[in-house]
Image (cartoon, helix red, strand yellow):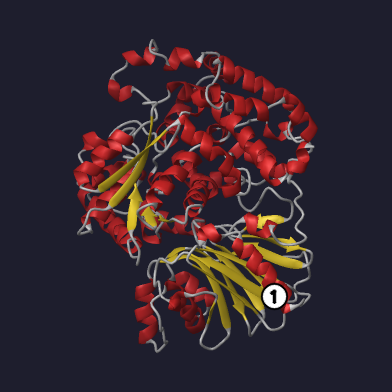
Amino acid sequence: MCGIVGLLDPQHERVDQLTEIVIRMSDTLIHRGPDDSGHWTDSHGTVALGIRRLAVVDLTPAGHQPMISSDQRWVLVFNGEIYNYRDLRKKLSGEGAAVRGDSDTEVLLVSVQHWGLERTLNAIEGMYAFALWDQHRCELHLVRDRFGEKPLYYGWIEGRLAFASELKAIASVPGFVANLDRDSIALFLRRNCIPAPFTVYQGYFKLLPGHMITIPAETRSGTTPTPRAYWSAFAEVESAKLHTLVGSTRELTDELEETLSRSVSTRMIADVPVGAFLSGGVDSSLVVALMQKQSDTPIHTFTVGYEDRRYDESAEAAAVAAHLGTKHSTLQVSDRDVAQVIPQLSGIWDEPFADPSQIPVLLVSRLARSDVTVSLSGDGGDELFAGYNRHAWLERLWSRADSLSPTVRRAIANGLGRIPPGAINGPASMTKILPVRWRIRNPSNKMMKLAKILASSTPEEAYYSLVSHWSSAESMVIGARDGHAGHSDSRQWQAFSDMTEAMLWIDLVTYLPDDILTKLDRAAMAVSLETRTPFLDRDVFRFAWRLPMEMKLKDGTTKWILRQVLHRHVPAALVERAKSGFDLPLDGWLRGSLKPWAEELLNESRLRNQGILDPVPLRRAWEQHLSGRIDLGSEIWEVLVLQSWIDQWMPSLNK
């Protein structure tokens, strides 16, 4: 795992100047690669590449980058892992290609040299972002992996194209101008992240998952060729749906276990210690179970816990670990831990990012890094096997709600929205009289979601109401032109006759890369920890989309077939409970220990002086949250994250 940087200079400036800038860029990414560094600049002053390396496979100098092919044509800087590199190496050797070392980087480079880039991209299985310079054709190729596990940013600065694994490296280039993209800020308030291809800055972009961009050396400054997809998730889904799996429950469960086991096995290959995150839920427990089954020694597992029992799953995770026989570590998170982490968030994520679970994921990553260099994660299981609550009940609920008139639905929604959270969550809550199996975590939040659904006009609108935060985001951002409003995969919603399948698709191509994987990459790499996600494997992906929906959702049970595999290794009683994951008690913290910090950032004079956000609805929302009339913790958190980011990256806005 690494951090890569580079410059393409059509003006052919001085070689030493390019080299100096690239070294400066890579120095900002030491956390992504503390073990080694390297840089290369061509003799014409056209391109410079740099890297910081976290050594995981082949710890010898043979894995040093930038790496140049034996025929001197190709120069590569690579961030990620190629999990099938050993199979590819055997195949290449059988065809007469020479692979001297044992690094996946060299296998990637030899593959390009021997097979060409297109065939190589089809052959490799892994997570990656890389830059490849073709010295014969004088072209730079930037490539990002299929699911978006590894990041890659790019943009023009004073006639040079800069690219890097993180925005902070680009911001270090002389001449960088930080112009705020207000349309991106509006998107952030809706999504709690800024989705690709946009960034917080005008003129800078994220490469989309499964895409590549080829930039000739003589490209006119400021004009970037259009990125193209080398792999289409949508085409794969369409193909998979034409070949639905047929077999008994046992046969399909066996096949899924074999497929997942192969994926887990390849992701355990490393020349450094490997462990796993364990929340105690279905996905992480299954990954750990399959790891432990293939290991002769106890796998090291890690989790976090809280004093607030509504959010604490550390005891459940410990019980799973004890059953599987792992070496388990738990970190109890206090208010003080949170207060210490918050000032670091803007520097880690570079642009506004407000998934609150970024804090526990960062803390559990730090915990893991004290013992291992690689940690496996259960991310991706929800998106492939229908694991979110909305997957289980939105379609059924909408079919019932649709039988009511819009007027009646809105009236019910308004009524639900007026119920104070304390009446639902408190000790005297009516939910306490329900059978245990019917109870849900944080019922007031679920009630708010129900109100949003009932206020919607279409199934698509109902879905987006659940995954959106500030519904009036565009009107809240002063100067936003709604320029990114068309950025949505909702146009593909109609391609799915099944509402739940449509949700799975949108989650796969938006929420997963823009939120979940961004959170995981930045949190882990901030502490030089490599994370790997066995669910994000092409074979697992194809299997999931070939499965009949009733094997994912059965009688309201999410991830049904995953549970069948898991129950072979872990008793159902240890893992069957309401979903929480690495969540945290944000609503209460904002009314308690974090209130003074929030009050300072939400000061009305401060907001007016900045001229970015309309302070009136923000102050109203903050007062409503403090009163307990409504829980707006997630929405308020987004604004606080934005304000903290401004303090670090654009402090001039506060003057």
Name which residue lies at 64% across and 55% down.
168
Residue 293 image offset from top left, x and y in percent: 21, 55
The answer to whether residue 466 is left or right of residue 566 is right
- Specify the quadrant that holds the C terminus: top right
Residue 523 image offset from top left, x and y in percent: 49, 48
Residue 485 appears in view: no
Residue 359 image offset from top left, x and y in percent: 49, 40
Residue underneath mark 1? 216
Residue 641 appears in view: yes
Instruction: Say few, some or many: other residues with alpha carbon within 10 Å of mark 1 (under 14 / 14 to 19 / 20 or more).
Output: some
For mark 1, give the secondary structure. strand
What amino acid is labelled 1 in the image? Pro
What is the quadrant of residue 161 in the picture?
Answer: bottom right
Looking at the image, is 430 positioned above or below residue 183?
A: above
The answer to whether residue 583 is left or right of residue 176 is left
567, 32: nearer the viewer: 32
Looking at the image, is 476 positioned above or below residue 184?
A: above
144, 234: nearer the viewer: 144
442, 594: nearer the viewer: 594
Residue 128 image offset from top left, x and y in percent: 49, 64
Looking at the image, is 71 positioned above or below residue 361?
A: below
Number of numbered labels in the structure image: 1
Name which residue lies at 39% across and 34% down.
580
588, 592: nearer the viewer: 592
